[in-house]
Amino acid sequence: MRALGVDLGSKRIGLAVSDFTGTIASPHSVLQRSRSRKLDHEAIRRIVVEEEVEIVVVGLPLTLAGEHGPAARAVTDEVRQLGNVVSVHIELADERLTTVAADRILREADLSASQRRVHVDKIAAAVLLQTWLDGRTPS
């Protein structure tokens, strides 16, 4: 089962894909937000088709207390819209601290701040997706 991890940011969308066994997540790309959600969602749909994705896992930015704040509500609303464009199941997954983990990984790789900005969103998506993959119950 191939999965696509999506980190919906206000300026960029980080993407990661799993291998075909649904075991290992790898960073894929970063989409710069356009002025149109419709265009952004169409770009995600194309990746779903090209990568033969069977499920999309979108990061849900819960508060540190685990509650649904404004950011989580905005993502939930956008996921409803995305669901009208992609033809596969979409699941929400807790993304708390994924960007922090991604930044730590990039710092340990000794990347400059400007290099980290280029990669952090797709690394955060990979952290999100790997956590989701690891948490699944084997079938």
Image (cartoon, rainbow, N blue to C red):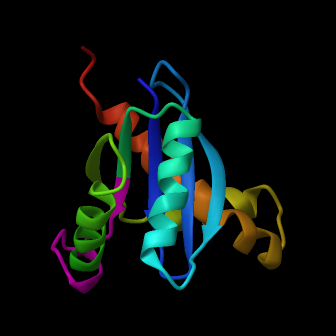
Give the residue at x 45% y 25%. Answer: 22
Q: Position of residue 112 (x, y in %)?
A: 84, 73
Q: Is residue 38 above or below residue 133?
A: below
Q: Is residue 113 left or right of residue 21?
A: right
User: Quadrant where the C terminus lies?
Assistant: top left
Viewer-closest of 120 and 90: 90
Q: Is residue 84 left or right of residue 35?
A: left
* Residue 82 lies within the magenta run: no
Q: Which residues are magenta?
A: 58-72
**Magenta stretch mostly in which secondary structure?**
loop
Give the residue at x 27% y 79%. Answer: 74
The answer to whether residue 88 is visible is: yes
Q: Is residue 18 above or below residue 30?
A: above
Q: Position of residue 7 (x, y in %)?
A: 46, 62
Q: Position of residue 131 (x, y in %)?
A: 40, 43
User: Quadrant where the N terminus lies?
Assistant: top left
